[in-house]
Amino acid sequence: MTRNADMEQVAGDFYAENFAKDASEGSLILNLGPQHPSTHGVLRVLVELDGEYVLRAEPVIGYLHRMHEKMAEVKTAAQYIPNMGRVDYGHAIAWNWAFVGAVERLAGIEVPPRAEYVRVITCELNRIASHLLWWGAYLLDLGAFTPIMYAFDDREKILDILQSPTGARLTFSYFRIGGVARDLDEDCVKAIREFIPWMRSRLPMYKEFVSDNIILRRRIEGVGVFEPDLCRRYGATGPVSRGSGLAYDVRRDEPYSVYPKLDFVVPTSDLMDARGRYDVRMEEMAQSLNIIESCLDQMPEGDTLVKGAPKPSWKVPKGETYFAVEGGRGKIGVHLVSDGGKNMYRVKLRSPSYSNLSLFAEASRGTLLADAVAILGSLDLIIPEIDR
């Protein structure tokens, strides 16, 4: 066992011992994770049960901490971009954007118009791929095996498209300070235009095949009700808060890039339960298709990287800034501080999964253990994003 793994084990055992001290007589302490299918990564959830009912649940994080924020202090801005693709492998392009957007805002760099449209197109394609990953894995958690096959079939089409301009299929490092690494060629644009009607035809099938299925409805309707106040208190964003009727979307409420020029709806649900969060994500895929199509129709000719783009050794100007984008799980924020030196002085990352997970302990209290798993899955957590 390595020294870090040994320290994590000691810390985890200490946490478990203290958790057990407060246990009620006759209750059962159960570990979900850190190696458990329902946690989708090395997340540990300590649960105290009275029969099948959850008395308490406490997430234990830190098993995957990789020091992304600390690494920013020993890298130039250009060298740090690949880190962003490894924070959230589900929607890596959004994290690319949050970081380069912060650097561009601080340095006063204006991105060419065509590059802005390319950014939106690739980011929205990646958002659909992220939601498909969640959809398939969530249904697998709930006992349905077949849907993940359909989800990955459609997701592969997106990854094939994104591989052309980015050279990657998962941990993208595509954005550059002042634009993107490569333009969308004719074949890529053609593939995107062919994918849009294909995906639109799949969504009604998903609804008939899965969403309206009575077994799924019984598992998620009325389960995990999040009142709007609960979302506000824990800083929940994205589909989690929109599933509770809070119509907040960074693309619309803190507009950036060309999103103000695009006509799209911010889906919300008043159900406030796991079903509401499910419905929001399904509708978001349809809205992303509309956004992509609008961008293809409006995209101008021109450069996709600002002339005289910063070199790898370029120094970020002295100052402090914050930039946010709408990721697949909610609001992604980058707080950047530079002293004008070779490396950045400080980078602080705002992770939506961390905030969304924080409400689980309160929301799961009093539920059945099986429903707690359904609630956890409805949050669409990416554990590397929590353990940055």
Image: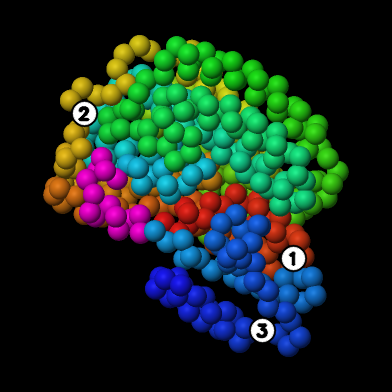
Q: Which mark is residue 23?
A: 3
Q: Are marks 2 and 3 in contact (CB under 8 Å)?
A: no
Counting other residues with Cα less than 10 Å from the Cα at mark 1, is it few (<14), some (14-19), or many (20 or more)? many
Q: Earlier in the sequence, mark 2 or mark 3?
A: 3
Question: From mark 2 to mark 3, how far is it between C-alphas?
Answer: 59 Å
Residue corresponding to mark 1 = 369
Image x and y of residue 337, in percent: 24, 51
Q: Tag 1, which secondary structure?
A: helix
Residue corresponding to mark 2 = 309
Q: Residue at x 57, y 22 (%)?
A: 290
Q: Residue at x 48, y 13 (%)?
A: 187
Question: From mark 1 to mark 3, how far is it between C-alphas?
Answer: 17 Å
Which amino acid, by three-letter code, is at mark 1?
Answer: Leu
Q: Is residue 162 left or right of residue 282?
A: left
Q: Is residue 291 left or right of residue 149?
A: left
Q: How many marks?
A: 3
> Looking at the picture, does residue 313 appear above or below residue 350?
above
